Amino acid sequence: MTKRVYNFYAGPATLPLPVLEKAKDEFLDFAGTGMSVMEISHRSKEWMKAMDDASNLARELMGIPSEYKVLWLGGGASSQFFMVPLNLQIPGKPMEYVNTGGWSSKAIKEAKYFGEVKVIASSEDDNFTHIPKDVGFSDNIAFAHITSNNTLYGTEWSYVPSVPKDVPLVCDMSSNIMDRPIDVKDYGAIYAGAQKNLGPAGVTLVIVREDLLDRVPEKNPTMHKWKTHAEKDSMFNTPPVFPIYICKLSLEYLKENGGVKEMEKRNVEKAKVLYDVIDASDGFYKGHAKPDSRSLMNVTFTLANPELEQKCVDGGTARGLVGLKGHRSVGGMRASIYNAMSLEGVKKLAEYLKEFQAENQ
Ligand code: PMP
């Protein structure tokens, strides 16, 4: 039996074991071709089918309407930080962002290369412990941008901010895509690096409303235009075939397991197990996020001092509960409990945290 641990890393992150097993089984012979998926031409009919399947599964699972394009792009979510303003800018109109953490800040920095950026709400002053309330974007802007889940700080939006009718809302869903149902029509564009809730690193899912594709100024590099990729169904150049293939397997698995609605149910249950331990710990574990802004995906907390945190992380590792150290910019501890993390894994962690408290307080 291969050794497997409970992996709480924030991304790349745990994937469902049946997905990895299927990939292993098919590794040398993909779809009966006698070639690995890594060897086969991206123009072959077998590959084109796999890619179509991946896009159709994303459409079905998220309820993506036909007027939206589904793209699989390289360059990570970080490339979308500049591709969003590059594709959606309107000369003379500002771009509005909400700053809810390190990744929002990076997106804001890139947008500034393209024109005026207004940060209309931010939780930076209280160390990104909450999602600003009642956010509403202005008229007459090029687009509005939010980060729906803040991987480093463990906060997640529980509402869709209000946006004037003609203004597209753009959302970085890298760390919570498909953690619960959403209405794609609320958004002009959505992007998500795959390596948390979808598959491995190396591909970013971009969902964009077709009417927005013509905004991009002609004088931009071809590869940077969403339009280029939309017109060629993400096959303008060689797509990242292996990561897309694993995404396809994991979307199949998600569908077999009840889809996004079922994930929401499980995610609420999983997150509650850990937040309950934090809340019942009498301050031994301090949750970083304010209760009304808590993430279903990244549970962040601190202990009395860094030494105790390290001891807790090390004790977890010794028990096969791995990846619990918080991000270096925040410190403390973080348990990332994406769709692929089982309730069993979360319960094991909760048990451990309770024991650790009993032994160390
Ligand atoms: N946005 C969010 C919310 C993230 O969590 C991350 C990665 N952790 C990124 C963007 C950047 O993604 P990538 O490393 O794929 O560029």
Image (cartoon, rainbow, N blue to C red):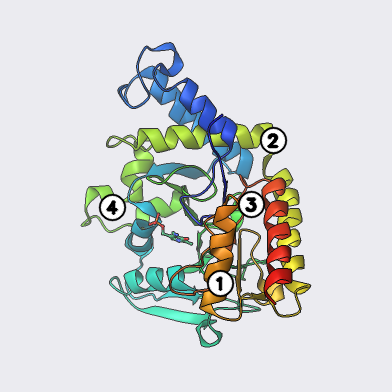
Q: Residue at x 53, y 82 (%)?
A: 127
Residue found farthest to the bottom: 125
Along the polypeptide, which appears first: circle 3 or circle 1?
3
Along the polypeptide, which appears first: circle 3 or circle 2?
3
- Badge nearest the viewer, 2 or 1: 1
The amino acid pointed to by label 4 is His
> Crowding at label 1, few (<14), some or many (≥20) Cα neighbours within 10 Å?
many
Where is mark 1, residue-wise? 309
Instruction: Judge left or right: residue 5 versus residue 239.
Output: right
Along the polypeptide, which appears first: circle 4 or circle 2?
4
Is the Cβ of the residue at disc 4 closer than 8 Å to that at disc 2? Answer: no
Where is mark 4, residue-wise? 224
The amino acid pointed to by label 2 is Asn
Q: Is residue 301 visible?
A: yes
Where is mark 3, residue-wise? 179
Q: Secondary structure at mark 4?
A: helix
Along the polypeptide, which appears first: circle 2 or circle 1?
2
Instruction: Judge left or right: residue 207 versus residue 257.
Output: left
> Crowding at label 4, few (<14), some or many (≥20) Cα neighbours within 10 Å?
some
Residue 129: x and y in percent read 59, 78
Residue 203: x and y in percent read 40, 45
> Vertically, is 88 above or below 135?
above
Where is mark 2, residue-wise? 257
Image-quadrant location for residue 155 = bottom right
